[in-house]
Amino acid sequence: ARALLELTTNTAGPAGTATGVDGDVDMDSDSSDPDGSEGSSQLSAYERKRLKNIKENANFFASLKLHEFFGYDYLMCIYSFRVRPKKAEDETVRRRSMRLQRVDPSGIPLPELPAQPETVVDEHVRWGRAKEEISQYEDSLSCMILSEDAVTKVVKNRICSMAIHPSESRTLVAAGDRSGQIGLWDLVNALAESYHAKRHIYKSSTRGYISSLYITSCITSYIISYLYNLLYNILFIQPFVYRSEDAQMSSFDFLQDNASTLVVGHWDGDVAVVDRRTPGTSAELSASLNSKATRTVHVHPVNRQYFVAAGSVNVCIYDVRSLKHAGDKPVCRLNGHTKSVASAYFSPVTGNRVVTTCSDDKLRVYDTSCLSSTVLPFATVRHNNNTGRWLTRFRAIWDPKQEDCFVVGSMARPRQIEVYQATGKLLHSFYNIDYLGSVCSINVLHPTQNILVGGNSSGRLHVFKD
Ligand SMILES: *[C@@H]1O[C@H](CO)[C@@H](O)[C@H](O)[C@H]1NC(C)=O
Ligand SMILES: *[C@@H]1O[C@H](CO)[C@@H](O)[C@H](O)[C@H]1NC(C)=O
Ligand SMILES: CC(=O)N[C@H]1CO[C@H](CO)[C@@H](O)[C@@H]1O
């Protein structure tokens, strides 16, 4: 535990060295050399440095005994840098001007949203559990409480991604933030013993962010793997799976249970199919989805050739077998979004539903039990998504234990995390006036136990459990 905590101080040892070097290289390529042309002249010196770092890092990580935390499991994440300084600049300017507009008294006020019913449920689609089953589930939700010692800060910055270990004997949560940190929290031990001694943080870098995080249990050795996208980046540890020199990655998912191949979403709208077993770090296939962005990708739990991609304003289901290099035709379009979509996920057991979170202040649920070329939502929930500039956007996620219910953060006061049925009915709100005082944008649920973790935008985790 000590060794892990020391990592945050970023001083002694190979980790410190590595991060330092990375910072230098990163800064060079980021500020003055966006396309890497300048860097190529220094490649050999750079390469030498890089290889040295790889070795030192591998030794260092081995010495950390991370398997004590992961067992035979595997933590995988996307570690993404901003690599397009020009665009980033434009974005900043645009964002600033938007903000100015908002405070400018002469600016045109935002139009009032048309009055809408809280929930629109299509009566023709009947789907969901038997009443008793739902009420049993509701009971289990009511038993989940947040205690004072189940709140802790695990990372410095705003949480962008989270994962929970499927183990039932220990509760281990991983959270990735915007500054590139991953925090690991061993709750059972922490709650039983010293809280802080069992809080594990290690610092991967001060730059870049962790946009996607998984703990999988199907790989027989422990490895920490970074998917990253910067040409002159430093490897933190080997082996890594995939790197893309020109695109930032937003999310990934496994195409098989055994995690041999992955589908990776890129911020520029592409997706890549990556086979972990093939040597090298390039993708097996990369395809353009004709979208300005791919924010989330999620693989169908049963028919694993399908994945749903949340684009900039479009959500489509694709067949990975027919992905080509350009102009891919989706199997199915989930229509109705009018603004940027933050996420789209298949329901966990059957994949017969997809829930999306959209900036037009709506959560939509689609029937994907039979895939036709276009589908309209069968349930729409009005849901304030106005997280604004400083908070991570909401992403509604299904409860892996309850096929027809999903969980989403909320702007409502007192601060809460909401549970909805697929029909759009609000089933439960998790709140605690004493210990939950902030918006939890990112949430994760344990696959078998009654545990919900909400992460806020300053790196704090809140764990509701029974
Ligand atoms: C993983 O599963 C796929 C299909 O289910 C199979 O083709 C592949 O060989 C498996 N890989 C490993 C490493 O077991
Ligand atoms: C996150 O939660 C902590 C404690 O509950 C609070 O102090 C902090 O202000 C919250 N951060 C944000 C960004 O809301
Ligand atoms: C992330 C975010 O705040 N998105 C949008 C939420 O909805 C309002 C309109 O109600 C938009 O203006 C925000 O951009």
Image: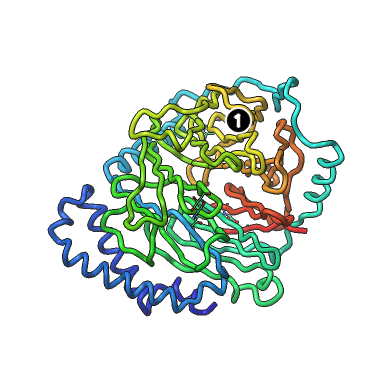
Judge whether 435 appears above or below 222 on screen: above
x, y percent for residue 65:
50, 76
* Residue 245 visible in image: yes
Which residue is located at x 51 percent, y 72 percent?
Answer: 66
Numbered disc total: 1
In the image, taking residue 106 as reference, residue 153 lies left or right, namely right
Mark 1 crowdedness (10 Å alpha carbons): few <14, some 14-19, many ≥20? many
Looking at the image, the residue that sits furthest to the right is: 132
Q: Residue at x 62, y 43 (%)?
A: 397
Which residue is found at the position 65% from the left and 21% from the top? Answer: 115
Depth check, front residue: 409 or 215: 215
Q: Quadrant of the N terminus?
A: bottom right
Q: Which quadrant: the C terminus?
A: bottom right
Q: Position of residue 168 (x, y in %)?
A: 70, 63
Asked which colour scheme the image uses, the reply is rainbow
Q: Secondary structure at mark 1?
A: strand
| Whether residue 55 is situated above or below residue 215 in the rendered picture | below
Residue 226 spot, x, y in % from top left: 41, 59
Cβ at disc 1 under 8 Å from ligand 3: no
Task: Report whether 120 appears left or right of 441.
Answer: right
Frontmost residue, 260 versus 64: 260
Tag 1 residue: 362
Vertical position of residue 135 compared to residue 460: above or below: above
Residue 83's x, y, as percent? 30, 48
Task: Specify whether 2 is left or right of 293.
Answer: right
Residue 337 higher or lower than 96, as above or below:
above
Q: Is residue 96 visible?
A: no
The amino acid marked with disc number 1 is: Lys
